[in-house]
Image: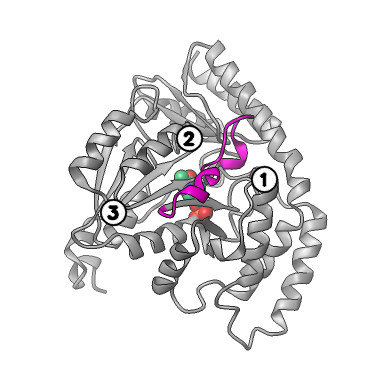
Amino acid sequence: MSDLHDLPLRDDLRGQVPYGAPQLDVAVRLNVNENPYPPSDALVADVAAAVADATRTLNRYPDRDALGLRADLAAYLGRESGVILSADQLWAANGSNEVMHQLLQAFGGPDRIALGFSPTYSMYPDYCRDTFTHYVVVPRRDDFSVDVDAAREAIAEHAPSVVLLASPNNPTGTSLPLDTVRAVLDAAPGMVVVDEAYAEFRQAGVPSALELLGEHPRLVVTRTMSKAFGLAGARLGYLAASPAVVDAVQLVRLPYHLSAVTQAVARTALTHSDELQAQVALLRFERDRLVEWLRGRGHVVADSDANFVFFGLFDDRHTVWQGLLDRGVLIRETGPDRWLRVSVGTPEENSAFRAALEEVTA
Ligand SMILES: *Cc1c(COP(=O)(O)O)cnc(C)c1O
């Protein structure tokens, strides 16, 4: 058998490892920011019926433009954020990872620069690598906010084709004030992508960048059904932008990229979005409780607008991570050295995490 290194692999892929948060079979999994609640029985039944229906025409290619789904997503965002959008401002793909990949394919490329603000989502460098886009980062401040002056300076220096702003940011949980997004939009010569994968978990009164879409043709807001909707396994992400942005990503999307089954599952889940509100409210409540508890125990904790909490500061975070794992609780070792990230689970899972952490740090 030949080894990977014997193959004529691209030079820049040699020695790289695939994306992989450990998928370990432990009792309490709080490591990839999933919604801990499985779909309700009512949703399961509706999805099964919708999939059966879609199956009847699986001999045909799916609706390439996913028009029905895009109209449903526009209606959902209207209810969620109060911003009225039309279907031609929406675009969907297999997870917001694929949406981002398409954006970098369309707007990045050789001799082009994407600008990010670290620490931030670990996949951004990979999208850039895949599209031969040069990735440049500006460090965030100690409280993980974005320094607007540093952002303006970096934009002036690098003239990025794409600026990536995650809000709420992963792994820190920090969201950006709209003034920061506006300042970046005013300074940036290219596209500004606000990754709002965790938007539904934001604190009351925190606005969405969707509110700026009307004024900014180069703004893109990405969302996902993986987190708040509890549909990580279905793979559905989407963007909202001006219709011209949708025209651009259609140039690079693979033919029939979004299966008829995926479209049917997503549309069915959207009809249940109201019942998910209560679940999101519980997760937000549990998040705030967890932040308070950690602070009470002397940990440094970043403010969180997401369904996870970023905390420290540990001299040896790996030992803490391992100690938790030994007690059946899997969290994430990611971001700056002395920090750990824990996803918000069910109240029972969060108690198990608290009990385990208390033992490990005793
Ligand atoms: C989880 C996450 C996504 C969503 O990924 P999907 O491909 O939609 O599952 C996007 N951006 C950030 C920052 C994330 O943490």
Residue occupied by mark 3: 161
Relative to 187, is 3 above or below?
below
Q: Is residue 247 left or right of residue 275?
A: left
Residue, x 39% and y 60% (percent of image)? 103
Do the CB atoms of the residues marked 3 and 2 lie less than 8 Å apart?
no
Question: What's the mark number on residue 289?
Answer: none
Label 2 CA crowd tier, 10 Å (few <14, some 14–19, many 20+): some
Q: Are marks 1 and 2 in contact (CB under 8 Å)?
A: no
Question: Residue 151's x, y, as percent?
Answer: 29, 35
Tag 3's secondary structure?
loop
Left or right, 41 with reference to 189: right
Asked where in the image residue 265 lies, by quadrant, the reply is bottom right
- Which residue is at 33% across, 25% downward? 141
Mark 1: few, some, or many residues within 10 Å (few <14, many ≥20)?
some
Determine whether the residue tagged by mark 2 lies in a helix, strand or loop. Answer: helix
Within 10 angstroms of label 3, few (less than 14), some, or many (20 or more) residues?
A: many
